Each structure stands twice: as C-alpha cells, then as structure tokens.
Amino acid sequence: MSPAISVDDVVDAELQQLYVTVTRDTRRALDLGEGDFAVIDNGTRQELVTFARGDVPLAASVLVDASASMLGSRLRYALRGAAVFVQDLGPSDEASLLLFSDHLLHATPFANDPAVLTAGLSKVEASGGTALNDHLYLALKQLEKRQGRRVVIFLSDGVDSHSVLRTAELTWLARRSRALLYWIRTDPRNEERTSRFSAWKNADEYRAEIQQLTDTVSETGGRIFPIARMEDAEAAFREILAELREQYVLGYYPIGARNDGSWRTVTVRLRDSGLAVRTREGYLDY
C-alpha cells in the first residue's frame, strides 16, 4: 500500500498542487519518478518542489440522483455503491453524502465514520425531478473550506429538469475550488429521449449543456464513468477511489503568478511518450 501523506504536507496557500493520473494502455503506471514529469504553467516550465505518489487525504462530496428516474432497485444499487466508497475511506479522509431530486432530500456533515455517512439512507425514496447543476454547485461550495484534495463524485444521467444555474456557472466554481469532478453517468444511451425533460427545452441547447458538463469534468482532471446497468455503480465507485489512491502529487510555486484572477493553463508532460497523463488543465490565479 502506498504511504499516506498528511494534510500538512500537501496544503499550502501559495503552493500549486497537481494530482496526476498516469496510465499505460488501460492500467495505471505506478513506477515513475520526479524526473519523468515536466510541468508547464502558462508556457513556462516549473521547478517541482514536492513530488509524491500516495494516498493523499481527500475531502469528497458524493452526490446521488434520487429523482423519479431512480425508482426501485436503481436507487438501491446507487446507494450501495456510495456506501462502499465511504466504507473504504482512509483514516485521514472525509466525505459528505447528498441525495437530491429537484430539492435536497438528504445530506450528511463531513465525516470519516461510515455509520454516520450511511445513516438514514434506507428511508430516502426516489421522487421528483432533477436539479443537477444546483446541487453540484452546492457540493462545490461545501468543499471550499475543506482541506486536502477536494473531490466531487456525482451519479446521475445528467438530465437536468429543474436547475436555475447553468453549467457555465459550475465551470467557474469548479475552477475556483480546484476540485476534481467524477461523473458516474447512468443511461448514457438515452440522451435523445431524455433531452425532452431537460430544463433547457431546446434539444440543441440541452446537448450543449451536456457537452459543457463533460468538458468541465475533463478540465478538472476527473473523468466520466458511463454505466448502462445500475449494478455497475459499485464498481465505478471502487475504481474512482482506486484512482485517487494512486495519483502522483506534483507541487510547485508558479513563476509569474499575478494573483489577479486570470486563468493559467497547465500541462504535464511525460518523458515516456507511450504513457497517457490526466490532470487539471489550469486554475484561476488567486
């Protein structure tokens, strides 16, 4: 097992932290050293001052869509996956679990105790429409004051029937929070049928919103897990946690930072061109 890294080692107001996933084919590459990485920030190569691979403490907001489309066994499978995730948290991790439809149905405080995080889940019944954007915004706001690696995991088909907020507002907050977003996307093949129920009544506008949400997830360094069967939700949650535990952590003090709120692009390059790398694409310079 990789060594745990304390929050004090990774949290610094001035230090930029990149959480980097590296894969060889479909398997994560876990044998790289500091010299295998190059960080380019706003076009300038940076000097790494910290380098590690390990189980960095995380603060995770886990959102589960509990709208009417999740009736019956669908919600049970989703909650089973979320329960497995919180049961496998490390001793320095914390999570909050939120169930939502067109309003918030259930929420827990941030905790490390699975009993606290799963209490009362069996009493929640799927009902109502879906306000995905609004609750993603809530989850990101929750994370603003949390230390460690900030993560949002949301399970939903992405069809938003009730939100007030648009995806562009989520993108801005995701950039500011520097959280990683992971989307367990249910029923991805039903997009044409379900677009009729979106809050964005125009089909083209709906597709544009879905594309922007997809792009935002990618920009944060997270990824999308499409599942056609709800029985696969547990495996998706397990894979997300495994990925988080095996990321590289690269730290540097950015050259030329102006603290003016501008967007700074970030690229991580690898010495081995046969490897694929994923991390956030930039950050707001605050």
Image: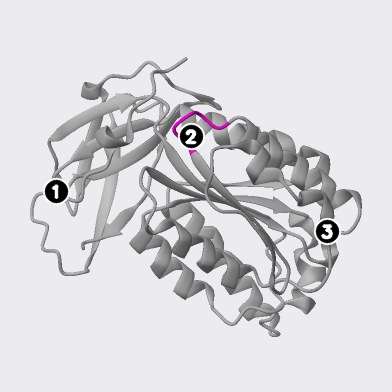
- Left or right of residue 185, residue 213 in this image: left
- Measure the C-alpha gap from mark 1 to mark 3: 45 Å
Q: Most extreme residue toward the left, as rendered?
A: 256
Q: Residues within 10 Å of mark 1 (few under 14, many from 20)?
A: many
In front of the other: 116 or 145: 116
| Quadrant in which residue 270 is drawn | top left
Q: Give the percent coordinates (x, y) of residue 115.
A: 67, 38
Q: At label 1, which amino acid type do we have?
A: Pro
- The residue under label 2 is 244
Q: Measuring from the top left, give residue 121's x and y in whole percent.
A: 76, 50
Residue beneath disc 3: 70
In terms of secondary structure, where does tag 3 sit? helix
Span of residues in magenta: 89-93
Which label's residue is closer to the chain start, 3 or 2? 3
Q: Label 1: which residue?
A: 254
Q: Are marks 3 and 2 in contact (CB under 8 Å)?
A: no
